[in-house]
Amino acid sequence: MGIPGERRRTVRRLVVMVWALVAVVAGGLTLWLQDSAEPPGPYGWERTDPGDAQHLPPCPTPEACAYVTRP
């Protein structure tokens, strides 16, 4: 039968190796799927003029606006 406990150690070692392999594959799959779910580029910065906010429609209430227009 061999050394007592040898089979148990072998089974534990195999379980740990399978768990590590599953964790690495799942992590890689997660990163791959996360990248594919993002919209395609191009990305870039836009330069805006501070006076552009004057062309926006007036807010019905100050709480409803995401921007502030100053006279």
Image (cartoon, rainbow, N blue to C red):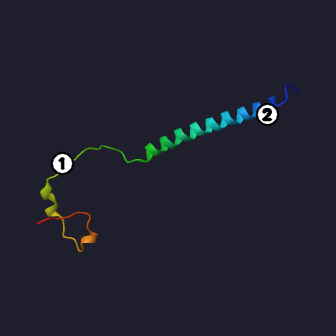
Q: Residues within 10 Å of mark 2 (few under 14, many from 20)?
A: few
In the rendered image, the residue lying farthest to the right is 1
* Residue 37 in the image, given as x and y percentages of width and height: 44, 47
The disc label shown at residue 47, or none: 1
Name the secondary structure under disc 1: loop
> Which image quarter: residue 26?
top right
Find residue 12 and name its label.
none
Which image quarter holds the C terminus? Answer: bottom left
Which percent across, then down, holds residue 4? Answer: 85, 29
User: Helix, strand, or loop for circle 2?
Assistant: helix
In this view, which residue lies farthest toward the bottom? 60
Question: x%, y% of residue 32?
Answer: 48, 40
Residue at the farthest front position = 4
Amino acid type at image mark 1: Arg
The residue to which callout 2 is attached is 8
**Which residue is at the front of the view, 4 or 39?**
4
Q: For the residues carrying marks 2 and 1, which lies nearer the camera in this image?
A: 2
Please give the name of the residue rendered at 18% of the width and 48% of the height, measured from the top-left corner. 47
Q: Residues within 10 Å of mark 1 (few under 14, many from 20)?
A: few
